[in-house]
Image: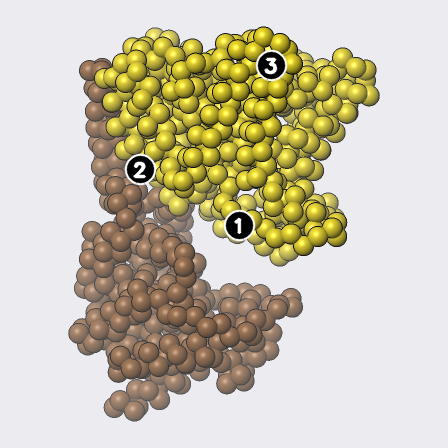
Chain colours: A brown, B yellow
């Protein structure tokens, strides 16, 4: 038994030492110098190279691919699009806002792209996917730590390994680190090429769903934190191809809930029928994303809406 | 309780240390309690089904042994087989039967909304093999119910095998006073980590691509579906053989030795050889208790083919109550029959090109059958195969996420190199017996553990074979 116990102790001691040392080297020499990609590089870029930016666009791929900061002239300042592909849920946004402030990046304006479907309550709901992309910054955000803790003791235990923060991202980070050429000056906007050329079935049925309290709380927190830090927040609901994602009742319900709780600017552009220039296939890459042609038009629409909102404030 | 969960880590640590300090009967009681807890982690009340099958076969075997006439022996054997199979039928095949009955227009019987008890097919087969062996006079009936219960429900092999034979496991459980050796612990531990790597890193990450494609198969072109099917072949191998590695490793840490279940099946040079290297505990079960019982190859060529087909069809149905599994089994039966008719024998050609060509052909044939195994319905499998053969639009090939795919291929590469270059030549035991072999095993376990932390799918789900 003595030998077995010594083996177990040595095994975990070695794991502990390697975990800490590899993490130290990786974080210092690779991760912190990676400024592209969805596995932390773009976030690093925001924190380190766009620290003084005055307006930030947050959201999913529907922000990243559809909102061109160059068209948002209403703020009279340079902006950065921090949208993220594949994730972009409101929990992610909440943690990201917390991290932005922790990193002393204090924008004057935040444009938060979001979708009604993100707030629907699901019986089986995995929040992991929204939180894990930000794990490398776990030490810097109380919000993120709370979310991680809510995932249960198994997750807590896994997080004792520092390298677990890079789980599923390690290869991507190294690849992006090696792509030095991508580290040129950028505004985060990633336009999509190509045009939608297939028929899709549009689901127009309205579904009665209740709102997820955890996700609503995340949105509440973003609104409150922005108020406390004197950041002007705009919540944007973008359109979809032939209103495939537009569920009018659900969206109105969500907007009513938000309005009843907060005095916040909501820009509802979800109904594509109100955006005449965006109805043709030529503007769309797929049913959820505008291509570069449509994005420029949409960004212009958005800018006009922001201008109107700002003019009513001033 | 999944092997790849923290709960199991805690459960096993406690069980292991208690097992170490106990002896004889204490160990037997501990194994019974631990195995019951392990099983009850899924749906507690289902442990009663497990106890029921144990009692049926325990008394049947004693009945067989106590009987003096062959008629009475047969009666007890049939009682054991029918009752055990009845449990399997009720929980696993009842709804399948209803579906087909209704489909044939004979009625409107309702489904029975019931969740299949986990690993039912495995412990039913294990129990049946015991009763049949007692009947054949190859082993003595076990009189100690605790020992017999542990044989059926010992937790490392309870839910997904290997399907152990009584002649191998019962004597080990009967004594249960062996000293746990450091070498056993080291070898078992390394084996467990290796299995965990295969499951969490290779199978669970490959499944992301496979699920994304198969769940939206109408949106994908032939090349994408081909890649997804190839990855499913890797996924199912690593998922199931990974589980077997972990089961064998856990048992070995406690000083028990299980039979091997896989031997690099995708390197087989014929389908016959494949079935000698894939899920060996099941294929030998099918051979010994079905194929040979049907007459094997003793009754002429035609009957041999029929027997092979029948055995594999039942083997397919054993996997799941769906026509897709039957077709999967039928295809394998067809391959085996054709090979038998062509006189294909299991050989190891020296020419590496011939080896490669034969292994590739077998791999493609097996991958074709996996489409039926993975697809949810027959029509889905049909569309997928149609697209794989006719839709060659490479421009529509969809890698989904190139970085993720590259990471999966890197992990598959590590797995292949380790299995082919190291484990094919040397088992964990023989590596340990080398000079500083223990150190090699420990060092590789550390590296694989770190690899799991970095590349493992932390949201990886259940083992595929748990559903059977």
What residue does disc 2 label?
Answer: B7
Camera-nearest label, 2 or 1: 1
On the same chain, marks 2 and 1? The answer is yes
Q: Which mark is residue B73?
A: 3
Name the subunit of mark 2: B
SS state under label 1: loop
B349, above or below B246, in the image: above
State which quarter of the image contains the C terminus of chain B: top right
B332, above or below B166, in the image: below
Q: State the residue in front, B86 or A88.
A: B86
SS state under label 2: helix
Q: State the residue in front, B333 or A236.
A: B333
Camera-nearest label, 1 or 3: 3
Q: Quadrant of residue A14?
A: top left
Q: State the residue in front, A73 or A220.
A: A220
A70, above or below B242, in the image: below
Q: Which mark is residue B113?
A: 1
Horizontal side, residue B237 vs residue B342: left or right: left
Q: Which mark is residue A101?
A: none
Please name the residue shown 34% across and 33% down the image.
B37
Q: Is residue B245 visible to the viewer in this orientation of the structure?
A: no
**Structural distance between the alpha carbons of marks 3 and 2:** 44 Å
């Amino acid at each position: 038994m003595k030998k077995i116990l010594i083996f177990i102790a040595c095994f975990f001691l070695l794991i502990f030492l390697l975990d800490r040392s590899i993490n130290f080297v990786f974080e210092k020499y690779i991760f912190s110098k990676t400024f592209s990609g969805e596995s932390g590089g773009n976030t690093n870029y925001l924190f380190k190279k766009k620290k003084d930016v005055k307006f930030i666009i947050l959201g999913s791929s529907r922000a990243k691919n559809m909102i061109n900061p160059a068209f948002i002239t209403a703020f009279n300042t340079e902006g950065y699009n921090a949208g993220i592909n594949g994730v972009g849920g409101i929990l992610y946004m909440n943690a990201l806002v917390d991290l932005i402030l922790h990193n002393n990046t204090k924008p004057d304006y935040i444009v938060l792209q979001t979708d009604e479907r993100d707030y629907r309550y699901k019986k089986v709901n995995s929040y992991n996917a929204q939180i894990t992309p930000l794990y490398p910054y776990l030490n810097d955000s109380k919000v993120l730590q709370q979310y991680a803790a809510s995932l249960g003791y198994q997750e807590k235990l896994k997080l004792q390994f520092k390298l677990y923060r890079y789980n599923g991202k390690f290869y991507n980070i190294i690849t992006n680190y090696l792509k030095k050429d991508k580290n040129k000056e950028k505004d985060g906007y990633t336009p999509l090429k190509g045009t939608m050329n297939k028929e899709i079935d549009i689901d127009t049925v309205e579904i009665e769903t209740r709102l997820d309290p955890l996700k609503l709380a995340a949105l509440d927190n973003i609104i409150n934190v922005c108020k406390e830090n004197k950041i002007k927040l705009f919540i944007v609901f973008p359109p979809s191809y032939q209103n495939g994602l537009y569920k009018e009742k659900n969206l109105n319900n969500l907007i009513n809930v938000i309005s009843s709780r907060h005095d916040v600017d909501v820009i509802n552009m979800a109904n594509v029928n109100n955006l005449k220039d965006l109805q043709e296939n030529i503007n769309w890459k797929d049913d959820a994303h505008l291509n570069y042609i449509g994005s420029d038009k949409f960004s212009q629409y958005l800018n006009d809406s922001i201008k109107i909102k700002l003019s009513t404030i001033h | 309780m999944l092997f790849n969960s923290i709960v199991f880590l805690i459960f096993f640590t406690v069980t292991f240390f208690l097992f170490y300090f106990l002896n004889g009967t204490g160990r037997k009681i501990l194994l019974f309690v631990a195995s019951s807890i392990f099983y009850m982690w899924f749906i507690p009340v289902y442990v009663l089904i497990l106890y029921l099958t144990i009692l049926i076969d325990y008394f049947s075997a004693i009945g067989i042994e106590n009987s003096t006439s062959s008629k009475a022996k047969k009666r007890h054997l049939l009682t054991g087989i029918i009752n055990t199979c009845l449990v399997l039928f009720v929980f696993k095949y009842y709804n399948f039967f209803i579906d087909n009955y209704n489909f044939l227009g004979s009625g409107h019987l309702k489904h029975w909304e019931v969740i299949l008890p986990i690993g039912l097919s495995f412990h039913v087969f294990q129990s049946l093999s015991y009763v049949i062996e007692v009947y054949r006079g190859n082993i003595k009936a076990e009189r100690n119910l605790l020992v017999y219960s542990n044989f059926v429900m010992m937790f490392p092999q309870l839910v997904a095998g290997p399907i152990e034979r009584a002649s191998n496991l019962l004597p080990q459980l009967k004594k249960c006073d062996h000293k746990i050796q450091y070498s056993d612990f080291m070898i078992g531990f390394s084996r467990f980590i290796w299995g965990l790597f295969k499951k969490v890193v290779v199978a669970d990450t490959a499944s992301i691509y496979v699920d994304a494609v198969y769940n939206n198969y109408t949106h994908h072109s032939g090349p994408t579906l081909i890649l997804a099917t190839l990855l499913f072949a890797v996924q199912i191998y690593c998922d199931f053989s990974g589980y077997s590695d972990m089961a064998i490793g856990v048992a070995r840490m406690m000083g028990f030795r299980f039979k091997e279940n896989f031997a690099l099946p995708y390197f087989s040079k014929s389908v016959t050889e494949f079935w000698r290297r894939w899920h060996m505990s099941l294929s030998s079960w099918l051979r010994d208790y079905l194929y040979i019982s049907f007459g094997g190859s003793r009754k002429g060529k035609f009957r041999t083919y029929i027997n092979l087909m029948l055995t594999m069809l039942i083997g397919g149905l054993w996997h799941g109550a769906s026509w897709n599994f039957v077709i999967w089994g039928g295809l394998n039966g067809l391959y085996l029959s054709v090979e038998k008719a062509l006189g294909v024998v299991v050989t190891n050609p020296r020419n590496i090109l011939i080896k490669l060509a034969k292994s590739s052909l077998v791999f493609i044939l097996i991958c074709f059958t996996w489409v039926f195994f993975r697809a949810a319905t027959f029509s889905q499998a049909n569309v997928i195969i149609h697209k794989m053969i006719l839709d060659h639009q490479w421009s529509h090939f969809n890698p989904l996420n190139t970085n993720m795919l590259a990471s999966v291929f890197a992990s598959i590469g590590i797995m292949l190199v380790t299995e082919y270059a190291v484990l094919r030549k040397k088992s964990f035991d023989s590596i340990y017996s080398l000079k500083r072999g223990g150190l090699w095993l420990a060092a590789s376990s550390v590296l694989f553990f770190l690899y799991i932390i970095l590349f493992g799918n932390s949201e990886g789900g259940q083992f595929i074979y748990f559903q059977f």
